[in-house]
Amino acid sequence: MGSDETEKVRQLPIGVFDSGVGGLTVVREIMRQIPNERIIYFGDTARVPYGSKSRETVTKYARQIVRFLKSCHVKAIVIACNTASSFALDQIEQESDIPVLGVVKPGVKTAVAATKNKKIGVIATEGTISSQIYTKYIQAVHPEMEILGKACPLFVPLVEEGLLEDPVTDEIAERYLGGLKDLGIDTLILGCTHYPLIRGTIGRVMGESVTLVNPAYETALALKQLLDEQHLLCETKPGLGDNKYRFFVSDGADKFQHFANSIFKYGILSAKQINIEEY
Amino acid sequence: MGSDETEKVRQLPIGVFDSGVGGLTVVREIMRQIPNERIIYFGDTARVPYGSKSRETVTKYARQIVRFLKSCHVKAIVIACNTASSFALDQIEQESDIPVLGVVKPGVKTAVAATKNKKIGVIATEGTISSQIYTKYIQAVHPEMEILGKACPLFVPLVEEGLLEDPVTDEIAERYLGGLKDLGIDTLILGCTHYPLIRGTIGRVMGESVTLVNPAYETALALKQLLDEQHLLCETKPGLGDNKYRFFVSDGADKFQHFANSIFKYGILSAKQINIEEY
């Protein structure tokens, strides 16, 4: 590849996707850590949530989205959804000619470094918990560590409804997390990209002695390293009228935009609806 | 049509569909009221819930399901989902050469007959409430009646998670329904087929003076009348090995079967997964 062409590839966007709005927590971290990068986000709001659906169905959805993102000429893909990372990352990595990154491995790395008593909790969707992916990744390297998983199926609907600080969310968090707290974990992985949005609630229930791990932060860091290694980091700042961040959804673009604007500091200009089943 | 052919049509199944498990409350009523009828049920568990999705998306999903049901040679279709009835019934009726019935009109009929103080509450998904379909139907005939709608977006996830009798469901019901209670309604339409499954909780919160209307009951009655008028009622009892009730889903057949068996008195033998996006 000539240096002109390399420069062109460097300026291509990163594709990020999730089942809905949760992946925006990963987008937020990428924006912070590698601010030169262009991003194309896809939220599968027509089929959200993924967490209660099967491996087969989630993999099919993930493949359609990857085809859509590739049609947008992305240079790398981040699966910003734990369920899709758990079920589909390996397969999508194998099929892809560009780098693909999930959110599970980066989260594992931080949790292992953080724990002192070697008891790590993982909260996630039913799909992620039943896949036991966190346990497998951690125990492959640290068989002495105890991993305690808990599915929290109502957290995604609560977040998607915008009940980020709400007594109902507190009540449900108490019920989901009480058992984990009693078991004496000192580290808790927020194993679903929606959960950092109710980090305050989760932190209050678990108490100060438990370290909360947000895989979004580590994922953005891992992405930065990966792009750097492959000489894909964008070194020039995109111009103002450059449409740096673009958002696509499979349903409810207005509702998505409203939500996105409530969690980002600056306004996102628009979200566009596409028919994902066509990909 | 010759009488042999008429008899053949009478023995065809009724197609019933919903976004997930909620429509089983309608199936249950059809089984009770017209026990000779064969039923084919489809639950769109790969794309559940519908209530927070747009008119356009829900209509597209409903059309795919109608195509699937027609491929099974049904003699009539029941849209056992308030969101899909609100958004798509008119269009699907127009496009269909067999009778199509929704759940909204039958529910309206009972509520209007039940209210004494002419204040009717409607609880439903966001989609159904924002369509204002209950208000339109009731006020077209009874403009003096006051209709108070309230979206309860978390009820469907709670029911789909099986929390039918649970303090969390109580807590959320208190929050959703408190306002309606204070406004003095005497009749409450359970405007989502999932809600009869938490009828106990809703009844406790609203108190004995409020009549709860379950459109599933009236829908089965309206279906019976419609089939009778069109000489489509099945007059012979299907044989034992006849596969009278068949269940299809777009994801998680085992989970669906488990849920169905928890609400039906007898066991359902199997649920089969199909790829609904192909229709």
Image: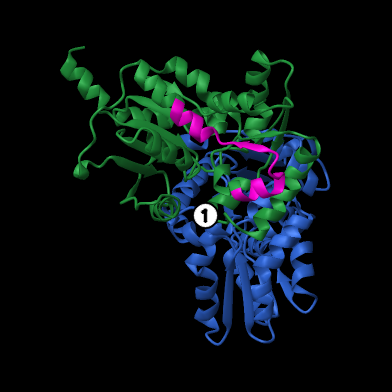
Chain colours: A blue, B green
Q: Is residue A177 left or right of residue B224?
A: right
Q: Nearer the viewer, residue B56 or B83?
A: B83
Residue behind mark 1: A52
Q: Amino acid at mark 1?
A: Ser
Per the image, label 1 sits on a secondary structure element best described as loop
Residue A233 visible in the current orientation: no
Residue at screen point 64% across, 53% down: A156
Majority SS type along the magenta span: helix
**Vertical side of A181 occupied by A87: above or below:** above
Where A255 sits versus A85, above or below?
Answer: above
Residue B210 highlighted magenta (yes or no): yes
Q: Is residue B42 visible?
A: yes
Magenta-drawn segment: B200-221
- Give x and y (percent) for residue A157: 64, 50
Residue A176 x %, y %: 65, 66
Name the quadrant containing residue A261: top right
Which quadrant of the rendered structure holds the N terminus of chain B? top left
- Judge whether B196 appears above or below B87 on screen: below
- Would you identify the image quadrant in which residue A175 lies? bottom right
